[in-house]
Amino acid sequence: MFCKAEIKSVRLLQEAFDKFSAVSGLQANPDKISIYMSGVKPQLKQELGYGEGKWTFRYLGVSLSSKKLTVGQCLPLVERITGKISCWIAKLLSYASRVQLIKAVLFNIQIFWAQIFVLSKKILKMIEAISRTFLWTGSTEVSQKSLVFWDNICIPLGAGGLNIQNMRLWNKETILKLLWAVTEKKDSLWIKWVQEYYLKTEGAETCTIPANATWVVRKILAARTYIIQCLSLQGDLATKLHEMVVNDKFNIKKVYTQFLPQYQKVETLDHLYFGCKVTHSLWQKLLKWLSIQRTLGGWTKEIQWASNWAKKKSAMGVIISCVFGMLVAIIWRERNHLRFQTSIFNAEKLFKEIAVHIHITGRRKPKWQALLLQLNNVP
C-alpha cells in the first residue's frame, strides 16, 4: 500500500485497514508489517505503530530500492540462476538439452528482472558467464572453457548460431517498453507521476532530460535516441514505438528482432549437402567407391536409405552406416570452417579422409576383411 508522506494520508490509510478488519475479521500482525519512508518527520513514523523497514527489501522476488540498484542488490538474481543449474544433473545432458534449458528457464528468470529494472552491464556479464559455463561444462563454476565465442552462440539459427537471446540487447528493448508506456500516457500511477513531475507540457521526444530525475527516469528518456536512430522505422517517436505494438501490447520480441544486426544467412546441412555440387559429388563418389549404383534424392530420402542399411548386420550395412555418419560429421565440420574460418571445401581430400578411416577401423573387424579388399581401388 502506498500513500503520501503526510499525517492526513497515513490516517486515511489506517482507517481503510480498520474497515477491512471489521468486515473480514482479519487483524494485521505488527510483527510482520513494515513501513518504508524517506525524508519525513519523526511523528509520522509513530502514527501507524508499525516498525520501520530498511531499504533494500524483496517484493515479488525482486529487490526494491529508492536508488539505483547496486551489483550486490542484484546478486539474488545470479544466485537464483546458479541455484537452478545446481539442481539439474547437467553432466548427463547433451549440448542441445542445455541450450533448451538456457532458453526456457535461465533466460526467463532474467526477463522477469529486466522488465522491471535496467540491469547493470556487470550483472549481465555475470549471467552470460554462468550460462556459457553451463552450456560447455554443465557446471556453475565459471570457467574459460568455450568452444565457440558467446556472441556467435546468440546469432539466429539461419545465420549459423544457436539463437540464444542476447541478454544485453534484450535489456535495452525492455527499456523501450517503459518509454512506450510513458508516451502512451497509460492510466498508471507512476506514468502520471512522470508526466506531471518531469515532462509536464512537453512530449517524451522533445523534452530535456531533467538532471534531478531518478536514474530510472533518465534511462527511460535516454532510450528515445536508441529508437529514433533506427533507420528501418519511419515517423516520429510515437509512430516508431507504435510499430512494435501487437494486440495493444508492446511486443519486446518484435523489437529485439528489429534491432538485431543483419547477419549473412548460412546454408543448412540439407542445402549445403544437396544444394552444393561439391558435397553432392562427394557422396556420389563414396557410393561409387562402395560399388552402389542409385539415384540420389533429398536429405530425407538419403537418411532413410542409410537407416535401412544400418538395420542390417552384414559388413556392407555397417560400412555404409560408418561412411554416411562420417559424411554428415565432415559436412558439419566443413560448414563451421566455412562460417568461422573461411576455409575451402576440398572434396578429394575429404574422400580420402573417409576412405582411410574406414580401412583403419576395418583392421580390427575380421568380418570386414573380404569387403575391404574390394575397396582398395579409388574411383
Image (spheres, grey):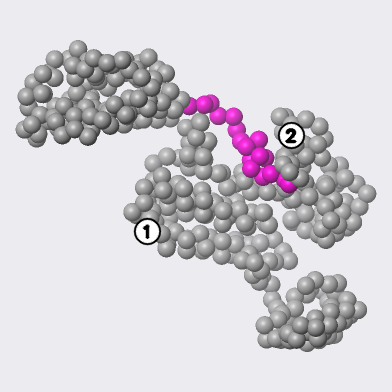
Q: Is residue 71 magenta?
A: no
In the rendered image, residue 37, in percent from the top left (x then y), is placed at 78, 75
Q: Looking at the picture, which amino acid does disc 2 mark?
A: Gln
In the rendered image, residue 94, in percent from the top left (x then y), is placed at 36, 47
Q: Which mark is residue 49?
A: none
Q: Nearer the viewer, residue 136 or 99?
A: 99
Q: Nearer the viewer, residue 357 or 268?
A: 268
Disc 1: which residue: 89
Q: Quadrant of the C terminus?
A: top left
Disc 2: which residue: 229
Q: Is residue 262 magenta?
A: yes
Q: Looking at the picture, which amino acid does disc 1 mark?
A: Ile
**First in residue order: circle 1 vs circle 2:** 1
Q: Nearer the viewer, residue 51 or 103?
A: 103
Measured in 3D between alpha carbons, the distance from the residue under mark 1 to the one under mark 2, in whole angstroms, is 45 Å
Left or right for 154, reference 185: left
What segment is highlighted magenta in the picture? 249-266
Q: Residues within 10 Å of mark 1 (few under 14, many from 20)?
A: few
Q: Quadrant of the N terminus?
A: bottom right
